[in-house]
Amino acid sequence: MEYKNPIGVDIDLETGVIPGAKKLVRKLSDLRGYFLDGEAYNELLKDDPVVYEVYAVEQEEKDGDLNFATTVLYPGKVGKEFFFTKGHFHAKADRAEIYYGLKGKGGMLLQTSEGKVEWIPMKTGTVVYVPPYWAHRTVNTGNEPFIFLAVYPADAGHDYGSIKDKGFAKLVIEEDGEVRVIDNPRWSE
Ligand code: S6P
Ligand code: ZN
């Protein structure tokens, strides 16, 4: 038996950084076609802000092992729509996941391939269980970075395709100073 070494790391709860983790940066230009308001998108693209960063500690894609990652999702909007992560199904669609809110506020949109959608608000201390077969996207509805930890099977993988093409059935927007979860006018089954 080949034993791997256990890991203990301290997440910086102010910045979300996991020491030694692999860092991934997603800028607005990486999210072309994701937001409803194309004009607002093009305007903001002049600055091409960072929308989110991921710090991931990942293992080989083997059954039974676990990965963990923090995401730092910056505050901002494209038109009325709050900044969000791309969102994905797992490539192995039956793989579940746990999220844990560390800082800031926001929420998670979850959706099945049949278009059933759920919105779960999140703040520091919120645990979200993402069941098998649910796509998931996080949204920052606050005005500071929304930081959370995700723990997921090492062989889960990411399938971005259908969300990239179709989006979610709901949008999370700000209207009259309120956070609203509305039907996506561009959604079709
Ligand atoms: C991985 C997990 C998260 C996301 C991260 C970025 O299964 O759900 O670590 O990868 O929040 O989101 P996305 O949709 O761009 O991968
Ligand atoms: Zn995931």
Image (cartoon, rainbow, N blue to C red):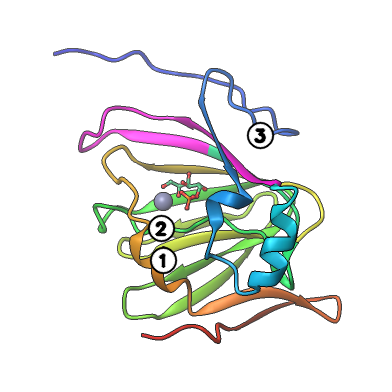
Mark toward the start of the polypeptide (2 vs 1): 2
Can you give x and y, in whole percent of width and height, for residue 75 in the image? 75, 53
Which quadrant would the N terminus be assigned to in this image?
top left
Of 29 and 73, the residue lying toward us: 29
Q: Is residue 169 above or below residue 84?
A: below
Report if residue 116 lies within the magenta region. no
Q: Which residue is mark 3?
A: 16
Q: Secondary structure at mark 1?
A: helix
Ligand 1 within 8 Å of disc 3? The answer is no
- Crowd band around label 1 with a 10 angstrom C-alpha radius: few (<14), some (14–19), many (20+): many
**Badge 2: how crowded within 10 Å, few (<14), some, or many (20+)?**
many
Of badges 2 and 3, the one in the foreground is 2
Where's the C terminus, which quadrant? Answer: bottom left
- Per the image, the residue denoted by label 1 is 163
> Mark 2: which amino acid?
His
Looking at the rendering, the stretch of residues picked out in magenta corresponds to 49-69
Q: Is mark 2 within 8 Å of ligand 1?
A: yes
Read off the residue under disc 2: 88
- Check whether the beta carbons of the residues at disc 2 and disc 1 lie within 8 A of each other: yes
In percent of width and height, residue 155 lies at 26, 40
Q: Earlier in the sequence, mark 3 or mark 1?
A: 3
Q: Is residue 67 magenta?
A: yes
